[in-house]
Amino acid sequence: MVLNIVMVGFFGAVTNLLDADALRQAVADSVPPAMQKLNLQAFDKGYEYGAKLVERLAEKSEEGEPVSMEAEP
């Protein structure tokens, strides 16, 4: 289940379709209280990774480099 929440965070950061705080609150509301901390940490990790990826792709685009969403070695 936690992997799904990581992907919710990643999707939120990459698409920027929904407010990050609203997504985070939806995650908190959708899991049992005992699992909230773990799931919110998972959301934050996914969001952080997605935001860094978007930033890196934007930098490459500005430099004229080809952009790809593939992981770098």
Image: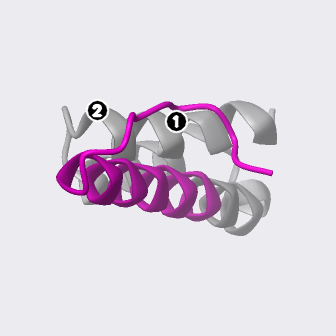
- The residue identified by callout 2 is 15
Above or below, 36 against 4 in this view is below
Query: Does 44 sit left or right of 33 as displayed?
Result: left
Within 10 Å of disc 1 (Cα), the crowding (few <14, some 14-19, many 20+) is some
Residue 25 part of the magenta-drawn span: no
Residue at the (78%, 61%) spot, across then down: 34
The residue located at (36%, 39%) in the rendering is: 14
Which is more N-terminal, label 2 or label 1?
1
In the rendered image, residue 54 lying in the magenta stretch gets the answer yes
Return the residue found at the far front.
64
Q: CA distance from mark 1 to mark 2?
A: 11 Å
Of residue 7 and residue 25, the one placed in the foreground of this image is 7
| Magenta extent | 44-73
Q: Is residue 25 left or right of residue 15?
A: right
Give the numbered dot on residue 59.
none
Q: Residue 8, labelled with which disc?
A: 1
- Residue at horizontal 48%, vertical 49%? 50
What SS does tag 2 mark? helix
Residue 54 location (% of width, % of height): 36, 49
Percent across and percent down for residue 11 are: 44, 33
> In the image, is 19 to the left or to the right of 15?
left
